[in-house]
Image (cartoon, rainbow, N blue to C red):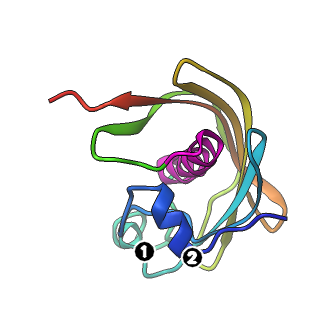
Amino acid sequence: MNSMDIHEILQYLPHRYPFLLIDKVVDYKISDYLIAIKNVSFNEPFFQGHFPIRPVMPGVLVVEAMAQATGVLSFKTAQAQPDDDSLYYLAGIDNAKFKKPVEPGDQLELNVKLLRATRGFWKYSAEAKVDGKIVASADLMCAHRKISA
């Protein structure tokens, strides 16, 4: 079983607080899958406005967390790390479904599976779970591209 702590994750993702949405990687297999964890705390900045009477993690941030998990697996698979000359972009979201709200105290399990990688484009199936139940799923396409000045 392969795992990554936050220090190693920070080597593979350029995101930082408040936008880093992965706390640890519990398992991965290069060119295949990755399972990561996001501990959802009431102290997250988005809960102040979404929604104050019943805090819910925005669905777009659940998708972003899944996309960050794809980024880690893509960089690990390519045996590369982010640099100042390129970015790993979210290029497409298909079949997104949200089945249950994610609330403070939940532990979000992010499961991503690489379907294919060609010419800098990566296609993944992704699921987010809480307590073993799917709360969101989507097919994600990502692209590694040079930054144009």
Three-letter residue code for mark 1: Glu
Q: Nearer the viewer, residue 9 or 85?
A: 85
User: Which residue corresponds to the image point at 78% horizontal and 64% vertical from the top-left?
Assistant: 2
Q: How many angstroms separate mark 1 from mark 2 (CA)?
A: 8 Å
Q: Mark 2 packing: few (<14 Cα in 10 Å), some, or many (20+)?
A: some
Question: Is residue 116 in view from this perspective?
Answer: yes
- Tell me which segment is drawn in magenta: 59-80
Mark 1 in CB contact with mark 2 (< 8 angstroms): yes
Report the side of 18 relative to 76 (left or right). left
Residue type at the position of mark 2:
Pro
Residue beneath disc 1: 44
Q: Position of residue 108 (x, y in %)?
A: 67, 65
Q: Where 125 sits versus 112, above or below?
A: above
Residue at (85% x, 65% y) in the render: 1
State the predominant SS element of the stretch in magenta: helix
Q: Name the element at disc 2.
A: loop
